[in-house]
Amino acid sequence: MKHLGWRVLAAAILAGLVPACGGGGGGGGGGGTVIVNPPPTGNSPPGVALVSPSPGATVITGSALVVEASVTDSDGFVTRVEFFDGSALIGTATAFPFRISWTAPAPGTASLTAVATDNAGASTSSSPVPITIAPAGNTPPPLNIAPTVAISSPSEGSVFPLGTAIDVQVFANDSDGTVTLVELFEGSHQIGSATQSPVHITWTPAQPGIYSLRAIATDDDGASVSSDPVTITIESSSSSSSRGGIPLDSGVTDDRFFGTCFVDARTEWVVGNPEVQARSTRTPAGRWRS
Ligand SMILES: [Ca+2]
Ligand SMILES: [Ca+2]
């Protein structure tokens, strides 16, 4: 019965009624290989599998891709591999490596198979490999690289007497374009801007206190980046002359502190030994006496 079935299938292939590959043919079943021609007595049919492209691969229409099969034959050798897209023959290879170059057709899907034939004339079809053909022209534009920016002066923790004209220096760079705007902020208040780097902005704070500076650079593609903040202290003339002795909200003073202390409702002072630590949402300006 089985032998009769092979003969019927082979006859149908020869008559062009059944595709010789598994894609649209009736013998594909669960995706395994299909022995197309009946093996003559004493001959084992070849084995064949598609190794390129990978199942589910996406290729661009019009591009060239390698379609390659891996073959085996336990009692002979493979003489020919035919490659199919559905039932259409797309190429034949007659020597190792059994591969062809195929130009991807119109966008859609393709189902590729390879049919190997051995030296005794037995043929086997591989499992089908589905791929997607994508339209051309869908390549996204290259991503813009955001600029970099840093405040190089003054340095973090600097202390200035009230009335000092501070030279704020900012460096910004854009590796794939140009910096078109550099803005300098104290908190949310803009204190200067420039259209190129490096930037020198002279700034004279009107009040003593602690200030957090940051710079924002924008590139020619509209990407903006903020620098790390730089915190500085402006001392009033009285605080800069009276060193030590900070009034704390608890009424305690500690003369080991040197500078200006920021005390507000969120500030918590902890007197320890030997250090006095400040825990606050804002940074005290100054340093402890060594
Ligand atoms: Ca064989
Ligand atoms: Ca850029």
Image (spheres, rainbow, N blue to C red):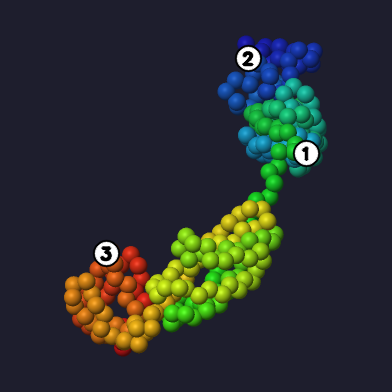
Crowd around label 3: few <14 · some 14–19 · many ≥20 (10 Å)? few
Q: Quadrant of the C terminus?
A: bottom left
Q: Amino acid at mark 2?
A: Lys
Q: Quadrant of the N terminus?
A: top right
- Which residue: 38% across, 80% down? 236
Q: Which residue is mark 2?
A: 2
Q: Which residue is mark 1?
A: 63
Crowd around label 2: few <14 · some 14–19 · many ≥20 (10 Å)? few
- Which residue: 71% across, 14% down? 9
Which of these two is toward me, 179 or 38?
A: 179
- Give the structural element (helix, strand or loop) at label 3: loop
Q: Amino acid at mark 3?
A: Ala
Q: Which mark is residue 127?
A: none
Q: Farthest left residue?
A: 251
Q: Residue 235 is drawn in which quadrant? A: bottom left
Q: Position of residue 270 (x, y in %)?
A: 22, 73
Q: Position of residue 176 (x, y in %)?
A: 69, 59
Q: Residue 49 is drawn in which quadrant? A: top right
Which of these two is toward me, 135 or 25?
A: 135
Q: Nearer the viewer, mark 2 or mark 3?
A: 3
Can residue 167 be seen in the rendering of this structure?
Answer: yes
Can residue 153 be seen in the rendering of this structure?
Answer: no
Determine whether 261 is above or below 40 in the image.
below
Q: Are marks 2 and 3 in contact (CB under 8 Å)?
A: no
Q: Amino acid at mark 1?
A: Ser
Using residue 34 as the reference point, say whether residue 245 is left or right of it: left
Q: Which residue is mark 3?
A: 265
